[in-house]
Image: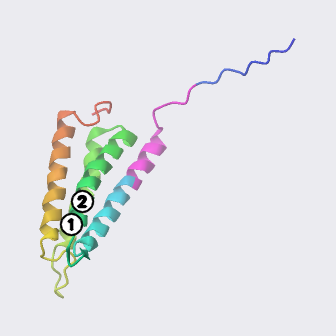
């Protein structure tokens, strides 16, 4: 008689391999760069006759979500600060006036709100990563 039962299969490894970790980290850092650029150009977003703080909302969500994704994918807690550092460098570069006088992040209230809310979110995420309360399953 033949055995009609399927052959036992092993469960997939829940840990991503090194290539997946590195590629995922590079993609997340690039996403942080793109998010910072998009946020910089969304500072003067107007609707219904007034400014909307869309860039500040993106700054908080991105600076909280991208480090969480980095912890989950790369499994190294302190690498989670890399997207935040990239975001901060891009935002500082966009808020610096050039010799020609051009400035991406203009001096209107959504600009400083985005800077403060994004930097505050980075500070909270960095503090929680340092304490080990964010991404507890990750290695240090």
Tell me what residue is drawn at x 19 percent, y 51 percent.
122
Query: In this view, which residue lies farthest toward the front?
Result: 48
Q: Is residue 111 left or right of residue 45?
A: left
The answer for how far apart the CA atoms under marks 2 and 1 are is 7 Å
Q: Is residue 36 above or below residue 132?
A: below
Question: In the rendering, which numbered label is found on residue 53?
Answer: 1
Q: Residue 23: say if magenta.
A: yes
Q: Residue furthest right?
A: 1
How many numbered marks have been drawn onto this rendered protein structure? 2
In the image, 78 versus 136, the foreground residue is: 136
Q: Residue furthest bottom?
A: 100
Instruction: Give 14 or 139, whichever is nearer the viewer.
Output: 14
Q: Within the image, what quadrant is residue 88 found in?
A: bottom left
**To which residue does mark 2 refer?**
57
Front residue of 27 and 36: 36
Q: Secondary structure at mark 1?
A: loop
Location of residue 87 in the rendering, given as x and y in whole percent from the top left corner: 25, 60
Decide: is 50 above or below 58. Answer: below
> SS at mark 2?
helix
Q: Position of residue 97 (x, y in %)?
A: 15, 79
Q: Are marks 2 and 1 in contact (CB under 8 Å)?
A: yes
**Highlighted range, magenta:** 11-27
Left or right, 37 with reference to 122: right
Name the foreground residue: 24 vs 117. Answer: 117
Task: Write the residue at 48% across / 44% down.
Answer: 19
Quick one: quadrant of the C terminus? top left
- Residue 96 colored in magenta in the image: no
């Amino acid at each position: 008689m033949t055995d009609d039962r399927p052959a036992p299969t092993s469960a997939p490894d829940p840990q991503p391999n090194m290539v997946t970790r590195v590629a995922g980290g590079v993609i997340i850092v690039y996403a942080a760069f793109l998010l910072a650029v998009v946020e910089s150009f969304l500072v003067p977003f107007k609707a219904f006759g007034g400014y909307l703080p869309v860039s500040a909302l993106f700054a908080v969500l991105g600076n909280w979500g991208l480090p969480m994704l980095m912890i989950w994918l790369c499994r190294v807690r302190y690498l989670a600060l890399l997207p935040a550092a990239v975001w901060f460098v891009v935002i500082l570069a966009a808020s610096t006036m050039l010799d020609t006088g051009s400035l991406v992040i203009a001096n209107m209230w959504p600009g400083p709100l985005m800077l403060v809310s994004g930097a505050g979110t980075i500070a909270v995420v960095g503090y929680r990563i340092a304490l080990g309360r964010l991404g507890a399953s990750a290695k240090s």
